[in-house]
Image: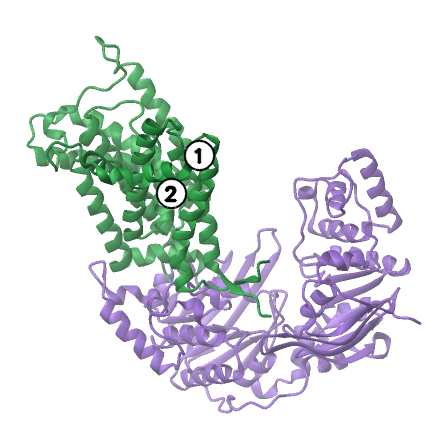
Amino acid sequence: MQALVKLENISKYFGSVIANENIHLEIFSGEALALLGENGAGKTTLSKMLFGMYKPSQGAIYINNRAVKLNSPKDAIDHGIGFVSQHFSLVPSLSVAENVVLAKEGGAILDLKKINEQVAATAKKFGLSLKPQAIVSELSVGEQQRVEILKALYRECKLLILDEPTAVLTPQDVRALFKTLKSLQEKGLAIIIITHKLDEVIEISDRVAILRHGKLVSTEITKETNARALANLMVGRDTIAVSRNTDHRVDEQILFAVKDLSLKNKRGLKVLKDISFNIHASEILGIAGVAGNGQTELLRVLNGLQKPDRGEAVLAKQKLSFNDSQHYNNLQIGRIPEDRHKATIADLSVAENLVLEHIEDFSKAGQLSKKAINQYANKLIKDFQIKAKANDKARTLSGGNLQKLILARTLAKEPKLLIVAQPTRGVDVGASEYVHQKLLEQKRNGAAILLISDDLDEVMRLSDRILVIYEGEIMAEFAAEDASREGLGLLMAGNRDAA
Amino acid sequence: MFGLKIERAPASLLQRFMIPIIAVAITFILASILILIAGANPLEVFYEILFKPFTKRTSRIEILVQATPLILTGVAVAFAFSAGYYNIGAEGQLYAGALAAALVGPKLAPLPQFMAIIIMLLAGFIAGALWALLPALLKVKLQVDEVVTTLLLNSVILFFISALLNGIWRDPISGWPKSPAIARSAEFPQIMARSRLHFGFIIALLSLLALWWVLKRTRFGLELKAVGLGKEAARFMNIKVAKTMLAAALISGGIAGIAGVSEVAGLHHYLIDGISPGYGYTGIIVATFGSLNALGIAFAGLFLALIDTGSLSASRSLGIPAYLGDVIQATLLLATLVALLLNNYQIRRKDA
């Protein structure tokens, strides 16, 4: 059988970072291919190249055996490729039919009646239940996703790529989506579904392509494999690292206790479900999980940016207020945030970014003490090996240096509790190593550390204890020495039987 | 195109320095087209606008008189914009200050001059800040877009003042729509003999100093900039974002109010309908063109005052419409905004 789409030796580099390397992959009409991998494994980059959003650094893409250049999403659409992203691009105030035809060009005159009929016909042909006249803003998330799919079908796509399609859906909507996908497959469409949920892979796909660190590790036939084997392929074998936590002795005193934290998002979905845990002094508690399972919300709450609906957190007998960040300084809570760019200000100087969090220490009667600021900044730059000058704009710093800046300003205050998120995301190997060393040093000095990371290697390397979070819930707890990569991987993908 | 390529990266220092110059150049090229249509010689007109005013003492001083409200509103706008609060209401806040001056001014006769002036300034600041309060509260409490609210409130106060002037304040004898004159003690003294230049100019210079000092030397100023440059990060770094933004909005309104006081107490000595020909709006151009810093605003205020003064005399001597000055100012704003956009890009020669 001839492949509908063929990727030949595709690589994509961003500067020195390898996003994808030497990928060979074929996709056939009428099949559902799952693209499985951890965060940062290169799934999204690969699909974006297929949709013309990125150009491959090397390699070729063939459609029906003809080499094609996909320079823009328009090219991809013209070649029959459709893409449903996690973030819908719909105009809320327009009807379904209007949204669908908006995406297709040509024709200056809009015949609403004709359009409604055409859109209804397409929806019917593929078994999508949608009213063409319905206003998009009044539709549920699942229905809006269906509109996105309809948009692609209306443009006669042959290959439909769905990026984490179930991330935003309720379980009922997931059922409906899978039914739709099955029927599309029967109509001869090829489907690529990007996911990291093993249960879904097993249920929906015919074949699975597993990516790790930008490389295609394996392509499996779904029927001939199982969740455990896939989890193994996805997370890979242990990699060697210099800094790792080998001394799991912790203090007996519980320093930080979180009890029954619960939170609903704007749509009323529970994103945190009764989260409880303790951290001892001199302990690193790791929370492993795939991104989007409540980590961001947990961090927002613990970092004092959002009040939970229920629950409390207590640090050394003092309750956290959840919304007064000043209070965090007084309690000596240090925060290394998930997104560096939301914790630093690109157009302020390195020195200003270093002192702003504790600006009261550097001003007298409202006046800034420039001298004190510069002295302090120069000391931190030296102590933490930040490659920048005090007056450089923060925007000129590399990811690793910006992370060192945040590390410096946080650790210099010798926090009792350290809330650390994705400390090495997008950071080069050398800087990662340095960050890990510093965190272990804090542990030795008696700090309680909460480490939240998508990078399983990192969690396993540093933690004394590991919790697994899935859909806002703590699934299991392990002592570091008892945790296996395989078991964690299964739990992270929502497979409860593994515990 | 043209063998150049544009990349998303912070502009080089040279490029940043060139931006206002390029903006001015583009403005005058575009203006030339209009001048040609009006049937005049562009070079002659530009000479009249840009150089002629320097040749006479009165017009040299007039530039400073014109620059006074422009610098004040420019500083007002810069305070707000620095905090990421887009106050388009300086015009209305200026009128609020002028109204306060007209209300308080006539009652200050028994006081010595310096006290009367301080009370005038305070009244104007408070009135301007009050007029800025509602949109600022709507912004920080309910996230209502301040561009819309501040802009619309301008018309509200303009019509309100117009109603006062044409109603209860109308001069019973002459029928002129003007407020009662303020007390002699409340008038700003002239600071140069035989000229219209008044104490308001000194206040404008002090406001520049205040802007520089607050933004560069104080904790509040640093927090203000932090909020303007990265709201979310500022919040993460323990800065009270809503409070800071509110304070910036009120200071902005207050200084615009002082601009209104300055026009009443320094020039007219009573309130009339057209006391500001849009100084509040021109203030936005001044602040933007002056890239929100004190030195830039001083330069921009003087430059726009020069264009104002010059285009008036050009229209008299060359018979071109006086509105040309407005057109040049507006074009300058657009050119500056486009040029500022380029601040985030690097223009480089394409590699062969």
Residue type for callout 2: Ile
> Looking at the rendering, which quadrant does residue A20 occupy?
bottom right
Towards the viewer: A495 or A388: A388
The quarter of the picture where the N terminus of chain B appears is bottom right
> Is residue B344 shown above or below A456?
above
Q: Which chain is purple?
A: A
Q: Give a yes or no on whether discs 2 and 1 share a subunit.
A: yes
Towards the viewer: B323 or B198: B323
The number of discs equals: 2
Q: Nearer the viewer, mark 2 or mark 1?
A: 1
How many residues crowd mark 2 within 10 Å: few (<14), some (14–19), many (20+)? many
Q: Label 2, label 1: how many angstroms apart (C-alpha)?
A: 22 Å
> Is residue B234 shown above or below B257?
below
To which residue does mark 1 refer? B35
Q: Position of residue B7 (x, y in %)?
A: 54, 63
User: Does residue B189 appear left or right of residue B83 in this picture?
Assistant: left
Tell me which label, 2 or 1, sits earlier in the chain: 1
Towards the viewer: B325 or A294: B325
> Looking at the rendering, which quadrant does residue A478 occupy?
bottom right
> Is residue B188 shown above or below A122?
above
Q: Which chain is green?
A: B
> What is the basis of the colouring in this image?
by chain
Residue type for callout 1: Ile
Numbered badge on residue B18: none
To which residue does mark 2 refer? B285
Towards the viewer: A269 or A242: A242
Q: Is residue A152 visible?
A: yes
> SS at mark 2?
helix
Taking the spot 39% from the left edge, 54% from the top edge, the residue there is B228
Q: Position of residue A458 (x, y in %)?
A: 56, 81
